[in-house]
Image (tube, rainbow, N blue to C red):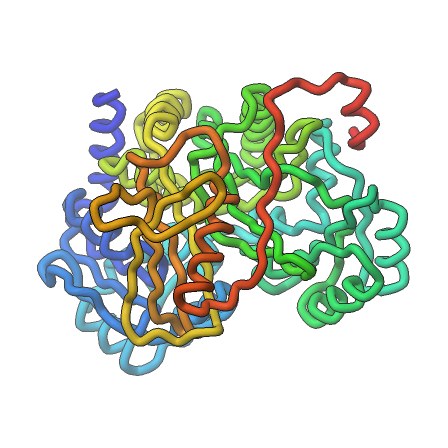
Amino acid sequence: MNHVLAALNERLGRLFGDRLVVLAGGTRLAKRAQELHALGARHTLVLDTDDHAPLHDSEIARWVSLGIKGGFVAVEQRRLGKLLTKPGAEVRAILRDFDARREAVVISTPYNEIGTFQGRPVLNARERGWVELENKTTIDALWDELSARRAPAMVFDLDFERLWGASEILDRGAGVVWSGDGPAINGGANFVRRVRSYEEAKEAFEVLAPKCEQVRVMPFLEGIPVSVHGIVFPDGTAVLRPIEMVVPRRQGQAKFLYAGCASFYDPPVWIRDEMRNLARRVGEHLRGTVGYRGTFTLDGIATEDGFLPTEINTRYGGAMVCFEDAVPVLPLALVQVALVAGWDLGVSSMEFEELVLQAADNHRAGAVGANVRAVQPTDVDERRVVFTGWACRLAHPDEPAQATLRLSPSPIGGRLDLDLHRENMPVGAPVAALTVAAFALADQEWGTGLGALEPAIAVEDTVPVEETFEEAVIA
């Protein structure tokens, strides 16, 4: 597939070569700046939301720390939006010095909807029609239009008694899940709660009511939370492999813990096929109805009855880091920018799919971690660990580690990361149970206060009979 890589880099070079580029927020900014430099960008200005600048080659990029990073995505995006629409005098001066002729192009975060930054085009700005598709309370209409099997669900305005009544109807014995949505950015299970009692319903309502306009109620689905990415090209939709969304459950609590993503898990083949087939249909629907282009995520649960979708995200999802690590020579985030900008990449969707899918199946990766409030570290502390069954312990000095636990300072206290060592990790099983074990060790070693957690339960590799499936879901 060298010719595909060559074609992609050549076309990206045409877009970014000899251009001034502003990176306004985002993640992996040093990597993005290096990729732009390799593609021939004249120079890059990095506006980092963090409060410190990493050591970086000034010939590749000028780095400016804004100090507006928030502990939650919604907070950070709100601050970044204000910066893009009404930058202060200092930022305006930096822009004038970097780009006096206003010829630079801008790349912002995957959430951004703002089309210009002080007269400069934001190449990856999302259209309003794309953003509206992320609403969890309206997405069931898409599944029905595509004749996709889904779990039963009811949607209500903020009426507690009606929500509780729907919960009693839909509860199959394991509770229900309330998913709120509205004007606020919704990610990382912020507005998702498991409800198993009247008391938990009251607590969930108190959280969701101030932030959401509507709430969807659906049965709690046992299984592994999974996501599959599609990339909409002009000629079709490239579909990638399933990614496990690592979401441990807090014992005795309604709130889930979103702890990142990993590609080590292999769902049963029939579920993988279901996911990928539906993702291709979703991609074609998005292209035909709202002119969508670029990456989207199709999220749901791998249950014993098959894949049941719950939402889509019409943006470059955080789990794309698994594919970035699988194909490090391909600037995937810049491919996203080019597609959203309507740039011809010179390769077909099937050529792109073959390249990335094969690499991701052969090279597993993960980005697992959580914010913690119970501690406020001042320095980075790392511990090498190994897993024994579903337990986690510190590695002996002469023992190969399977992962590294890292505690770092963060704006809201601490940041706990679990770096999984690919060469020593088993392939096939989900990493949720390993994450629970590692986080328990972090509580023991550092007092991170995450508390008792439970992993999701994986599906057996057997195909259900049609009668069982029809009893469990609504077509």
Q: In the depicted view, which residue is nearer to us: 191 or 134?
A: 191
Q: In the rendered view, would you say 138 is above or below 181?
A: above
Q: Determine which quarter of the picture holds residue 6.
A: top left
Q: Is residue 395 visible?
A: yes
Q: In the rendered view, would you say 172 is above or below 131?
A: above
Q: Is residue 83 visible?
A: no
Q: In the rendered view, would you say 433 is above or below 279?
A: below
Q: In the depicted view, which residue is nearer to us: 363 or 376?
A: 376
Coordinates of residue 335 in the picture (x, y in percent): 33, 39
Q: In the depicted view, which residue is nearer to us: 178 or 338?
A: 178
* 288 relative to 76 in the view: left or right: right
Q: State the quadrant of the N terminus.
A: top left
Residue at the spot x=49%, y=66% of the render? 72
Coordinates of residue 233 in the picture (x, y in percent): 43, 31
Q: How many marks?
A: 0
Residue at the spot x=51%, y=35% of the render? 228
Residue at the spot x=50%, y=37% of the render? 430
Coordinates of residue 360 in the picture (x, y in percent): 36, 30
